[in-house]
Amino acid sequence: MKKILFSLLITFFALPSASDSLHKRPAGDFNSAISRIISADDHPLLDKNIFLNYKNTLDELYFLSPEQLLWIKPYNPSHQQISSALQLIATANASGLEPEHYNLTGLQSIWQQLSIKKNINYTELALLDTAVSINLIHFLSDLHFGRINPMAFNFSFDTRKDSFIFVPLILNAIKNNEIAQLSSLVEPAFPAYHKLKTALLDYRQKQSGPNIGRLKYSASLLPGDPALQIIEVRRQLSLLGIAANTDSLSIFYDQQLVSHIKKFQRLHGLKEDGVIGRNTVKALNIPISQYIQKIKLALERLRWLPKIQSGPVVMVNIPSFQLWAYHNDKIGETQTLNMKVIVGKSDKEERKSPVFTANMHYLVFSPYWNIPKSITIEEILPKLLKDPLYLEQHNIELVARFREDEPVQPYTEDSFNLLQSGLLKLRQRPGKGNALGKVKFIFPNGYNVYIHDSPARQLFNRSKRDLSHGCIRVENPVALASFLLEWDKREIIEAMHLQSPKKVQLRKAVPVIIYYSTVSAVKDEVIFYDDIYDYDTKLSQALMKHNNIPPLPLISIANKN
């Protein structure tokens, strides 16, 4: 059917043949061919949806171009640009994309046939030229914006895809013969993104080596223990590049292996205790293909993140339980603040920390904790039934509204019912034991989520820290407040010990990005984490469905002569 359609389109577009006398033909013939192609509802070399998605951008690209054809130079065959465009698409693998999703083989085949054909008509050249253009725009769009709309997972990022931004970039690259540099102009600028691209190459090289074995767990191995399995553990670590290749047949868990295991545990978000336990064995059994998939997913997610302007920024990666704060225009390890965080629980959807971005505007020292209705009903009221003194013991008071100057209501016989109905609310006074600690960091958002201190300092010693109701608890609130306000430590501590709340406005709004990635590039290391919210599975399924979109139809448009 496609071949028939193509034949009909060729007839419809019918233009003079471009043979040895092509240079004598008026350029307007190409303009006419391209105009007819763009005004049609289908393109014989393109999937219809892809063609319609980028049709307007294609129109703009050729309208602004000083050349009738962008990639094929019939008047100057020695200066073809098509090879550069196809070579750029061929680099998609390096960024975790698939070159065949942009029909690389099909375009190469058609170009090869046309390049040796004796008689070529204008329409054939125009069809191939426009097909190359749309494939390139599609590739650049996926590279810049990502393939999947993050809103499909209720991630609140800006999802607008404006492919018109690539028009001046492409035209300028053609003019300066810099097609190969287009990808570097549109990919995310985050240093972590480029470190992960390097890691992707590294793990693909590992994949070409021996397969990861399958270790069995029977009992935990402690330093000094003998076990035949130690030989296989050494081999696994060697294949992963954690330890140098070794032919040691020692069955003893020696100190050198302990240091390698601790490094492996750190690179997998595990407790660095040197014990080869159930979780460590499980991590040792992860196949290389799974590492590669995690890196691909991380690259996709980094493409979703907003483009950050110069200045301070705060980023929280949920599955790594980590926060980073740095100045985007002063990137360097000495300027980066890093600390542990506690995130929302994974057991219930409503308790998961949301993925979104917002601007932080102010801090509140010695804050009230305005207790959400859900926590009041589900957790506090049952305790109050058992212990009438619960509110007093936990420094909690009743109010009609969450305002600092709101008068406190006495607890009466009706208070319990009024709390259940929401006519009364609970808030915890500032001071020792306050659930928010001594400071909270506010970036207004529809989730009512914020960053705050915590009195439960012991929880930061856990390796798995999905323990909150959705808000982000930080390990070092003094350092974060100092970073944001540029105050010294003494001023921060004084403000944290006030008897009543103190609101401090930031001089400039600071972007806060709460994102989700099961891989992080930290310094010169790549660290893998558990998929605590099962988002890797969902994204993998979405990408699989996306990649099942039929590739551009492979149709030969060059008859043998």
Image: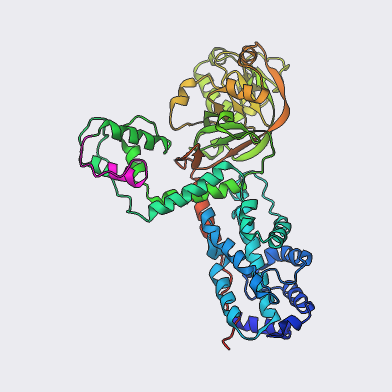
The quadrant holding residue 252 is top left
Q: Which residue is drawn at 73% across and 71% down?
A: 38
Where residue 6 sits: x, y (%)? 64, 81
Where residue 341 sits: x, y (%)? 52, 29
Where residue 349 sits: x, y (%)? 54, 40
Q: Residue at x 68, y 46 (%)?
A: 158
* Residue 445 appearing in the image: no
Q: Would you say the magenta stretch is mainly helix, strand or loop? A: loop
Colour pattern: rainbow
Q: Left or right of 165: which side holds 47?
A: left
- In which quadrant will I find the C terminus? bottom right
**Residue lying farthest bottom?**
561
The quadrant holding residue 483 is top right
When the figure is inspected, residue 454 is found, relative to residue 143, above or below; the finding is above
* Residue 142 appearing in the image: yes
Start-end of magenta stretch: 234-252
- In which quadrant will I find the N terminus? bottom right
Does residue 111 belong to the magenta stretch? no
When the figure is inspected, residue 130 is found, relative to residue 185, above or below; the finding is below
Q: Left or right of 221: which side holds 325?
A: right
Where residue 257 sits: x, y (%)? 29, 35
Does residue 240 belong to the magenta stretch? yes
When the figure is inspected, residue 103 is found, relative to residue 282, above or below; the finding is below
114 or 418: which is nearer to us?
114
The quadrant holding residue 131 is bottom right
Q: How many marks?
A: 0
